[in-house]
Amino acid sequence: MNHPTLTIDPGAVAANWRTLAARHAGEVAGVVKADAYGLGAALIAPALAAAGCRSFFVATLDEALSLRALLPAARIAVLNGCPPGEERTMHARRLIPVLGSLASCACWRAAAGDDGAPPSFLHVDTGMNRLGLDRDEAAHLIAHPDRLDGLGLTHVMTHLIAAEEPDAVENTAQQGRFAAFAARFPWLRTSLANSSGLFLGPTFGSDLARPGYALYGGNPTPQGANPMRPAITLAAPILQIRAIATGETVGYNGTWRAARPSRIATIGVGYADGLPRSLSNRLTARWQGEIIPVAGRLSMDLTTFDVTDHPAIAPGDVIELIGPGHDIDAIAAEAGTIGYEILTSLGPRYRRVVKSV
Ligand SMILES: *Cc1c(COP(=O)(O)O)cnc(C)c1O
């Protein structure tokens, strides 16, 4: 390996989708927003479609337009809804807005032709207070269900705020609020669980689950072992190794000081590549399965490791940043963030290698 390399395994993503589809009674979609969480939608979406995935969620209209070019027949829903004035664009490309307010419902209906509006989803907020009908709008629709006529609605959805915490009381509270709302509109299909929601039990079942993170190998059950297959590895060759004396420091501002004569290895990956700078003095990488601790602050383009305990390590050897024994959840924990942010921050400078089956 001559370059920092991100290896992506679309076969693992497809296998993860099949795993989730097998444990869910309803349909399972694929959430491929943010360029398939950084892995590359052009690579991932066709792999999911080949595995049998028929429905996809993206965040924005532009993401949906790109995805439509890849998947002419898929159902594509836009979580952030239809930007005002773009209704015709969405009609023409058969893109589905997730309507989250009475105002956006009115726009979607107004742009429809005589045949009524093309398909749409309705989002009801049950606790996130972010997108979706608020409490007053939901109550208004319950009192005036005819307000939903002519909107092309097929599904009603909501989003869980703490699905990765199985004991959070908010899960059952949201599920109850959602069920009560959906029961008023029995002709609409339902969409509830994200990745972690699929592991909360049968009451969180719905007609269309919306997993993202678990498809990409993230752990949807952080209290326990990861049931998903890893979908990426990230590794970089050592550029240089130097010997330093006791008392010398490494990196900006000298935050790491050698307590003994030490060997320091440098790789060409830094925070500009999406490694959080909060990994400074916290990251543990791997070399041939052995733990290699970071030394000092991450720089923009470089990261330094203390390899004193591994005299066999030589320049050109490969340091694994994400891989067996150190998955995306582990590096996220060291950085004080979540694996989602690690994935969606993966930078543009890596050599991207597609693992073939
Ligand atoms: C991102 C997102 C998902 C997917 O969530 P994961 O935790 O990645 O499975 C599902 N639904 C909505 C509304 C989202 O924004």
Image (cartoon, helix red, strand yellow):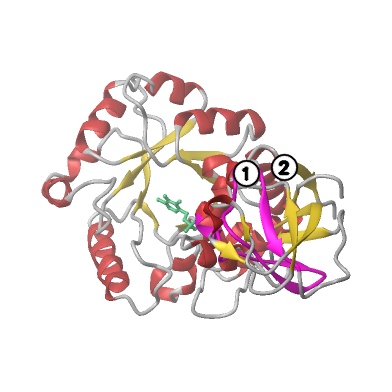
Q: Nearer the viewer, residue 355 or 302?
A: 302
Identify which residue is drawn at 59% across, 41% down.
272
Q: Quadrant of the C terminus?
A: bottom right
Answer left or right for 181 relative to 31.
left
User: Element under label 1?
Assistant: helix
Q: In the rendering, at what x and y percent does residue 109 appear? A: 28, 27
Give the mark nearest the N terminus, 1 or 2. 1
Q: In the rendering, at what x and y percent does residue 99 appear? A: 32, 39
Q: Is mark 1 within 8 Å of ligand 1?
A: no
What residue is disc 1 on?
A: 273
Identify which residue is drawn at 63% across, 67% down.
247
**Location of residue 119 with respect to 230 vertically, above or below:** above
Question: What is the crowding at mark 2: few (fewer than 14 residues within 10 Å), some, or many (at least 20)?
Answer: some
Question: What is the crowding at mark 1: few (fewer than 14 residues within 10 Å), some, or many (at least 20)?
Answer: some
Amino acid, disc 2: Tyr
CB under 8 Å between callouts 1 and 2?
yes
**Location of residue 203 with respect to 75 vertically, above or below:** below
Q: In the rendering, at what x and y percent does residue 165 appear? A: 39, 73
Q: In the rendering, at what x and y percent does residue 289 appear? A: 78, 73
Q: Is residue 303 magenta?
A: yes
Let me know if residue 322 appears in the view: no
**Location of residue 93 with respect to 315 vertically, above or below:** above
Residue 350 — which label? 2
CA–CA distance between discs 1 and 2? 8 Å
Identify which residue is drawn at 28% across, 56% down.
128
Let me know if residue 214 appears in the view: yes
Answer left or right for 245 relative to 207.
right
User: Element under label 2?
Assistant: loop
Amino acid, disc 1: Asp
Magenta extent? 278-307
